[in-house]
Image (tube, coloured by chain):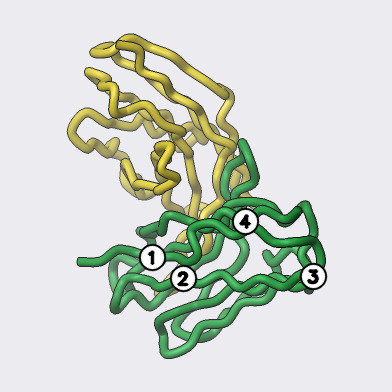
Chain colours: A green, B yellow
Amino acid sequence: GAGVSQSPSNKVTEKGKDVELRCDPISGHTALYWYRQRLGQGLEFLIYFQGNSAPDKSGLPSDRFSAERTGESVSTLTIQRTQQEDSAVYLCASSPGGGEWETQYFGPGTRLLVL
Amino acid sequence: AQTVTQSQPEMSVQEAETVTLSCTYDTSENNYYLFWYKQPPSRQMILVIRQEAYKQQNATENRFSVNFQKAAKSFSLKISDSQLGDTAMYFCAFMKQFRGGADGLTFGKGTHLIIQP
């Protein structure tokens, strides 16, 4: 079946603009995760959704970052007033519920460049 | 908070050789999962292998196996008969276990593995 998809693949924006990144999880997966990967670094956990709710938003880097999920499906990560330090690859992952919730399946990521 | 340390930024071996990537972690949790993910230049994160902390037996997946030492908080990955397609970044990751829920992964900074022909 289809894997996790993300759009756009690449995004170039100017400092101060808002951007929206989209994630479509694997159908039926109840949990969804967002990560940030800066150049040459490991992944940094941002937020996860269990269904449509996000129990813990403390991983978001600042109040310029927000995320939502609707219909237990697609999620959007919004970055307002982008800064150059927001440049990174943003990866989304999903996992099924039940007995396999701990295995996360990743999308290809969105590479964000803030000029 | 958990931390994951990968002390080898880059490794290079010849095709068909065996290579071991090291990973150590720090946690006060007793129940958790450990993972190795592979990230080729395509950026796609691919699960290589996982280990449940409550299992003493080391996980294996074909040419990939782990050496899990819970007391030492060590979780190394061994790749046997290495192939050119194994060239990638390899990330060690930790997830604490709790009932019926989800949680984010804590990643190390990665090891860039290069398989030479």
Query: Which of the marked residues, 4 or 3, is nearer the chain's N terminus?
Result: 3
Q: Which chain carries label 3?
A: A
* Residue A72 or residue B41, whichever sits in front: B41
Q: Which chain carries label 1?
A: A
Q: How crowded is mark 4: few (under 14 residues within 10 Å), some or many (20 or more)?
A: many
Tell me the kind of residue under disc 2: Cys
Numbered disc 1: secondary structure? strand
Q: State the CA–CA distance, disc 2 to disc 1.
A: 6 Å
From what the image shows, is residue B101 above or below residue B34?
below
Confirm or deny contact between disc 2 and disc 1 (CB under 8 A).
yes
* Residue B64 or residue A22, whichever sits in front: A22
What residue is shown with label 4? A112
Residue found 38% across the figure and 61% down from its top: A102
Q: Mark 2 lies on which chain?
A: A
Query: Which of the marked residues, 3 or 1, is nearer the chain's N terminus?
Result: 1
Tell me the kind of residue under disc 1: Ser
What residue is shown with label 3? A81
Numbered disc 4: secondary structure? strand
